[in-house]
Image: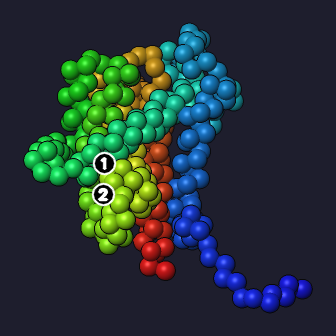
Amino acid sequence: MAKFRLYLEENNRSPLAQLWREFSRQHSALFGLILFSTFLSFSVLAPFITPHDPYLQADNLLLLPPSWTEQGLVQYPFGTDDLGRDLLSRMLKGATYTFGLAILTVLASLLAGLALGALAGMSRGVKSSFFNHLLDLILTIPSLLLAIIIVAVLGPGLENTAWAVILALLPQFVHGIRNAIAEQLKQDYVTAYRLDGANNWQVLTRLIIPNIWEKITVLSSMALSTAILDIAALGFLGLGAQAPIAEWGAMISDSLDIIYVAPVSVAIPGLLIFAAVLSVNLVGDGLKVAIQKRRES
């Protein structure tokens, strides 16, 4: 039985609840979110769920086929590589280096981009003009090429790869945040807040950043897919993760010589990279559509 209410009370959803309602109506976005959560769980829990040591070599198990073939073993579902290492364990461990490292690099680049973007968006005069033209010049260089140049200077390795991806993504964040701040500064409520005596820091922290977090989220999702591809590409080119690190791009590069003997060792890392990028893109597109519909409603 419905409760009697003397006064009519409107129940307005919060912005996050409205955003989730519009996001959950998209089946592709929900599928991408489930896939994204799966990869995130693998990247965090990989050290605890790998059935075997991903770096343990077994001379009697070289190039073991997958378990669904007659020569395969149930203990090694995806088989082994040319050194007898379990492919399933290496795939799970690779999620930490390819997917997990991509998330960390995006977060680091986001924090630095937020600071520099706020500085560029709130500044005026010659300093702002020089900074903006410099950003436009850097953005003409593809992120992967910029990452390759940085790794060539710093040297190969997984740690240098992380720094290269952070620096390669930084101009995108600075440019996007700068434009979002410049758009917000044109709004009437910002002018009214300044007339009340608010300084630049108060305008930035209390008005602008709370109103651009949705754009920052969409920008981060786009940067995450780029980071995954850049880390895998650098590993494939031999500039990123070095042997015996189980990174997906490096695993593809190491298995190219045996692709006709053990195609699974090349196909599965490639499919994982594709699925990881697909999950991020589906979530990003779903967020973009949900934000647009929430504003229209």
Choose the circle earlier in sequence order: 2 or 1: 1
Name the residue located 70 percent from the left edge and 84 percent from the top edge. Answer: 9
Q: Label 2, label 1: how many angstroms apart (C-alpha)?
A: 7 Å
- Position of 281 with respect to 124 (left or right) is right
Can residue 40 be seen here? The reply is yes
Name the element at disc 1. Answer: helix
Q: Nearer the viewer, residue 159 or 35?
A: 159
Query: On screen, 137 above or below 195?
Result: above
- Position of 174 with respect to 20 (left or right) is left
Residue type indicated by callout 2: Ile
Q: Quadrant of residue 39?
A: top right
Extreme residue toward the front, this view: 197
Can residue 222 be seen here? The reply is no
Name the residue located 43 percent from the left edge and 39 percent from the top edge. Answer: 107
Query: On screen, 135 above or below 29?
Result: above
Tally of numbered discs: 2
Q: Nearer the viewer, residue 270 or 223?
A: 223
Crowding near pointer 1: few (<14 within 10 Å), some, many (20+)? many
Name the residue located 62 percent from the left edge and 76 percent from the top edge. Answer: 12
Residue 118 is tagged as 1
Image coordinates of residue 231 in percent, x first then y, are 36, 33
Residue 54 is tagged as none
Q: Quadrant of residue 234?
A: top left
Q: Nearer the viewer, residue 275 or 123?
A: 123
Residue type indicated by callout 1: Ala
Image coordinates of residue 280 in percent, x first then y, are 45, 51
Q: Quadrant of residue 130?
A: top left
Which residue is disc 2 drawn over?
181
Q: Are marks 2 and 1 in contact (CB under 8 Å)?
A: yes
- Position of 3 with respect to 292 (left or right) is right
Name the residue located 29 percent from the left edge and 63 percent from the top edge. Answer: 185
Name the element at disc 2. Answer: helix
